[in-house]
Image (cartoon, helix red, strand yellow):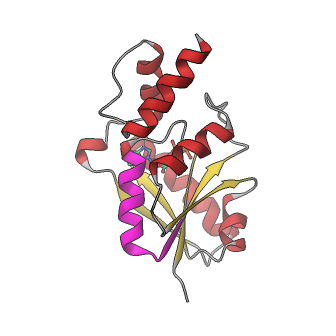
Amino acid sequence: MKRIAIYPGSFDPITQGHLDLIQRAIALFDQVIVTVATNTRKITWLSLEQRMKLVQEALEGNPQVTVLPCPGVMVDFARQHGALAIVRGLRTAADYENEFQLAGMNRKMAPEIATIFLPARQEYSFISATLVREILMLGGDISQFVPNVVMNRLREWHKLNE
Ligand code: ADP
């Protein structure tokens, strides 16, 4: 039986921090489904199609990774896809508070699905998609925070919007 994990998020846009987490999840599971939130509380900067495209391009050629939109509740999605676990990242104490609450709710709804927390690697722990967006909008250099393919696409789309 394949050991499947889901890694849910907004990915608005995907960053080096997210990618590092995905690489580490691949080492633990046979298949990682990166699930891109569709009806998040957050109003996203990029459209679902754009966020999916960036995740797909950043992970191209990786047979252990599938990218799918998550139209409903995370644990329902995990169940439907036979996932054993939900992978989440922890950067700060604030992340811990939010994530612990989310994991508790998810455990109530689906006790058979584990939440696995992976601590952010030190060099990526300060990277957030929100700051990447702000730097880009101010015309700054985001090359250290996102893969090249993502940086090029974002520059292209940002120029189109100017
Ligand atoms: P959400 O809107 O669900 O918080 P995000 O795309 O912002 O989605 O993040 C998805 C997951 O990745 C969250 O668990 C978050 O804590 C984690 N994460 C985000 N950035 C990093 C990073 N730089 N290093 C490690 N984990 C991260």
Position above or below: 70 against 126: below
Q: Is residue 141 left or right of residue 157?
A: left
Q: Is residue 1 left or right of residue 37?
A: left
Position above or below: 57 against 62: above
Count all numbered tags in the image, as a single digit.
0
Position above or below: 100 against 27: above
Tell me where residue 10 appears, x and y as whole percent. Answer: 58, 43
Helix, strand or loop for the magenta stretch, by majority? helix
Tell me where residue 138 appears, x and y as whole percent. Answer: 43, 12
Tell me where residue 149 appears, x and y as whole percent. Answer: 43, 39
Q: Is residue 40 left or right of residue 159?
A: right
Q: Quadrant of residue 92?
A: top left
Residue, far bottom: 1
Q: Is residue 10 visible?
A: no
Question: Over which residues does the magenta segment extend?
Answer: 17-32
Is residue 42 magenta-colored? no
Is residue 22 magenta-colored? yes
Tell me where residue 44 appears, x and y as whole percent. Answer: 64, 32
Q: Residue at x 46, y 34 (%)?
A: 129
Q: Residue at x 55, y 89 (%)?
A: 1
Looking at this view, is 31 or 58 the one in front?
58
Q: Quadrant of residue 15?
A: top left
Q: Quadrant of residue 128?
A: top left
Looking at this view, is 111 or 24 the one in front?
24
Looking at this view, is 18 or 79 the one in front?
18
Position above or below: 153 against 63: above
Q: Residue at x 45, y 37 (%)?
A: 150
Q: Residue at x 47, y 55 (%)?
A: 60
Q: Is residue 61 visible?
A: yes
Q: Quadrant of the C terminus?
A: top right
